[in-house]
């Protein structure tokens, strides 16, 4: 057993649907007790300190300790081509993406990038991600091998694309090879250790009807797998999907017809959805990965977070970097862009709503809330230690917070925390990440503690 | 005399109107010779190296050396309130801005913040800015005193707001006090050393007609001063301006009627402009400060850069952080948001266009191209030394650039530089800034050279 002491922030409820102050759990002096991989106990130090006085305890002073961030949509093979210049979706795929991803036929190369990718996630405080790979099964093996070494919770799967013309011939798979390789990979990796498998048709346009049907077949055979794909990102893409699947009433319906929509189904982007599609996403308990950095970077459009998180048609929502179309590995930078996407629609994304999406909201969107997303005992000890004042600008901002000192001390503390955390969300990035724990192990620690 | 050797990038022409490769001047091995405050000579090392072989030379290997960045719209008194949560323009002013700016009645406090502000600009590679202050003349004195100590080129001025109800009574000035104080400050600071004065009505709505007329009177009396203000940022604000000035045909016309529109007039934002207003901005040789970080942060809207930089109605354009409504001090982060604002309008902001706006474009927009913005001999030696690979993500991206190796070596070098500089523009921030020179003096150097 070991313990961590400091200020903790996590969520008990969804602040989009409950009073924010009730939704959040903020302990100014808390203790988190870790037994092996998992959280054994959690509460205020005042209550629990005596009980664990003989447990080796690491104290983080002036830090904010949160559940590790969750990135619900990211492409590990694109690590090296992050922020490729200038194209919209379909041109970008052709010009940059496939030439890069072809390198992942080489398993050793794939493994090297997987290690880099995971280390960058950890340096950014991300402890779980839902990850696209390539059409090459060795790129999936390499990824899960790297994950297994770290005992980290990742969802990934072979990423199918079999429609001629949508990728170079040497990149394409077929419905049959996709099916056989997916089965094989599911058997080898799904629920082995913390690894989780997602059946992953890249996007509707990239798959033939046969490949999508094979996805449905796989989901029938392995009902506890995840399904991960893209949806309704870009007007041109949507028009092409309509043309390729004339029998489907809309983009979502392509996936519905394949039998893959439902719990554990995540649609990346989902920017341009009709009210009816929102209703069906909601009633099927499907989820959306909101990827604002990517959506702005590619000029795809503005995701309607207020619609997805409405009372009428509530949809599970997590946030994704969508690196490499997204221009960062940092969930904090993603929240900055999320704030801006909301602001352009006269919505306000509060810091607590943002941090919820990055933690418990992401976990719930992936149906992983029993394993990750908060500090409830029994969950895995996946933790990020944050410095809300990592730069001179944030330090000066924090020192000058306007706090109403006539209010009770606890309320002042909360207000100060929210002020600083919001600064971190808007101006922060990996510099705010001091340390990252996965399954109770310290896997990342920032070098030095000087202010840059 | 002293010299700097390394790879240099600046602009000879505007890449929005000329072939980008002709517009840019890229020397892979160049030398810049500094005599006192100014650039004495500049060219390739091969040509000039022998001539200056006995001059003390600092060599920056694997760096990109550029003219210092120019921030054409920023509020120094808002340093401590950067990224205040959640309001649109008018509410934000009331709730956060005025309470903070009232602190600048205290000159010692103002000076302390001015020093911090200038140091943060330098750490971000910014060597010239056009700066808002407060209604308190001592806040202007404090600022110019801090600038004078650094021999840095800043444009600033007393920031008038005299309309009752638009600011707390103790923050308001009057048309008369504004006029008298502005005159006094112009006499004291304008063109003293590198200091430059801007007549600064905060925004049309904040000023009575009398105050704006006083601005016109000042401009008549001191025709070589600058004029700096806000314009057409937000729909609600625009409607209120129309109501307050029924005699004006649009927002721009309020300023035209006051006699302040013309060369050296900068309108911050100018998001929502009619074709006619574009025409008048163009023909009057006025300029716009494009502040995308702020425009997204406040949800103000998408500036039409393609319209401002059109052949039909070309308007001078620089970029501004608009810190504190903008959420950064970094011109690189501003260019990231500029890219996204353009992308949402299916425009592509290339790295050379972006870097032009940040340097020579900014200088031209302020009619300062004789003093700053490029490495032409005779200009001041205001220089930023950039590391295009300051983070592991950018280093890995740079190592894996897809470069056509069948092309001539010089073209490959250019392509590689553009690839890396674009990465820096999209993922970079103050971490990319290695050193900043002002008037030939090294005023900022990054601590340590390790990769974070």
Image (tube, coloured by chain):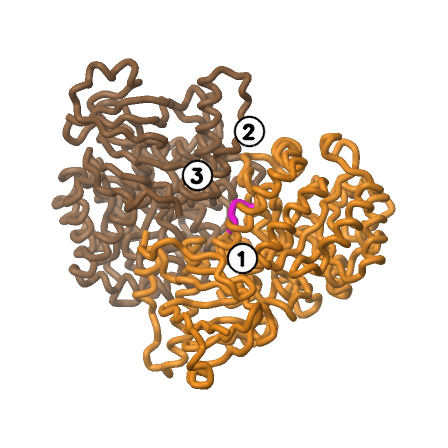
Chain colours: A orange, B brown
Q: Residues within 10 Å of mark 2 (few under 14, many from 20)?
A: some
Asked whether residue A388 appears in the rendered view, the answer is yes
Residue that mark 3 sits on: B424
* Chain holding disc 3: B
Element on which disc 2 rests: loop
Residue positioned 27% across, 23% down in the render? B31
Quarter that holds the N terminus of chain B: top left
Residue positioned 84% across, 48% down in the render? A214
Q: CA distance from mark 3 to mark 1?
A: 23 Å
Q: CA distance from mark 2 to mark 1?
A: 28 Å
Relative placement, left or right, of B366 versus A376 is left
Q: Is residue B316 above or below residue B427?
A: above
* Chain holding disc 1: A
* Chain holding disc 2: B
Relative placement, left or right, of A209 versus A273 is right
Q: Main secondary structure of the magenta part?
A: loop
Residue that mark 2 sits on: B402
Residue positioned 51% across, 49% down in the render? A120
- Percent across and percent down for residue B319 are 39, 40
Q: Which residues are magenta?
A: A325-329
Q: Nearer the viewer, residue B290 or B405?
A: B405
Asked whether residue B206 appears in the rendered view, the answer is no
Q: Are marks 2 and 3 on the same chain?
A: yes
Residue positioned 65% across, 39% down in the render? A107
Q: Nearer the viewer, residue B285 or A370?
A: A370
Q: Residues within 10 Å of mark 3 (few under 14, many from 20)?
A: many
Residue that mark 1 sits on: A126
Q: Are marks 3 and 1 on the same chain?
A: no
Q: Nearer the viewer, residue A193 or A13?
A: A193
Which tag is nearer the camera, tag 3 or tag 1? Answer: 1
Element on which disc 1 rests: strand
Relative placement, left or right, of A21 versus A414 is right
């Amino acid at each position: 057993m070991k313990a961590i002491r400091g200020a903790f922030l996590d969520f008990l409820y969804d602040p989009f649907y409950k009073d924010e102050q009730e939704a959040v759990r903020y302990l100014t002096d808390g203790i988190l007790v870790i037994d092996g991989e998992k959280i054994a106990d959690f509460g205020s130090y005042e209550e629990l300190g005596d009980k664990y006085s003989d447990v080796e305890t690491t104290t983080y002073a002036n830090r904010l300790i949160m559940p590790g961030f969750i990135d619900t949509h990211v492409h590990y093979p694109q690590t090296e081509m992050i922020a490729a210049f200038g194209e919209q979706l379909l041109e970008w795929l052709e010009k940059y993406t496939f030439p890069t991803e072809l390198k992942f036929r080489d398993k050793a190369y794939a493994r090297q990038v997987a290690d880099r990718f995971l280390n960058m996630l950890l340096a950014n405080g991300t402890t779980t991600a839902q990850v696209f790979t390539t059409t090459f099964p060795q790129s999936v093996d390499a990824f899960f091998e790297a994950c297994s070494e770290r005992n980290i919770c990742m969802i990934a799967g072979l990423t199918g694309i079999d429609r001629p013309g949508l990728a170079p011939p040497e990149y394409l798979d077929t419905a049959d090879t996709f099916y056989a390789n997916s089965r094989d990979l599911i058997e080898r990796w799904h629920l082995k250790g913390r690894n989780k498998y997602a059946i992953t048709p890249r996007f509707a346009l990239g798959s033939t009807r046969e490949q999508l049907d094979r996805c449905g077949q796989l989901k029938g055979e392995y009902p506890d797998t995840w399904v991960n794909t893209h949806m309704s990102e870009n007007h041109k893409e949507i028009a092409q999907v309509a043309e390729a699947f004339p029998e489907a009433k809309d983009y979502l319906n392509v996936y519905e017809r394949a039998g893959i929509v439902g719990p554990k189904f995540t649609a990346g982007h989902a920017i341009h959805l009709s009210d009816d599609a929102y209703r069906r996403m909601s009633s099927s308990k499907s989820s959306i990965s909101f990827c604002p950095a990517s959506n702005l970077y590619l000029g795809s459009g503005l995701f309607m977070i207020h619609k997805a998180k409405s009372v009428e048609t509530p949809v599970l929502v997590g946030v994704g970097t969508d690196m490499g179309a997204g221009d960062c590995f940092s969930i904090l930078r993603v929240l900055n862009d999320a704030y801006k996407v909301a602001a352009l629609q006269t919505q306000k994304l509060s810091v607590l709503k943002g941090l919820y999406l990055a933690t418990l909201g992401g976990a719930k969107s992936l149906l992983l809330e029993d394993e990750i997303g908060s500090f409830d005992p029994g969950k895995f000890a996946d933790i990020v230690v944050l410095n809300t004042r990592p730069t001179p600008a944030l330090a000066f901002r924090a020192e000058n917070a306007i706090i109403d000192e006539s209010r009770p001390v606890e309320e002042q503390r909360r207000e100060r925390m929210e002020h600083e955390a919001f600064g971190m969300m808007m101006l922060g990035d990996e510099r705010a990440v001091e340390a990252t724990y996965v399954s109770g192990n310290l896997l990342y620690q920032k070098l030095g503690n000087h202010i840059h």
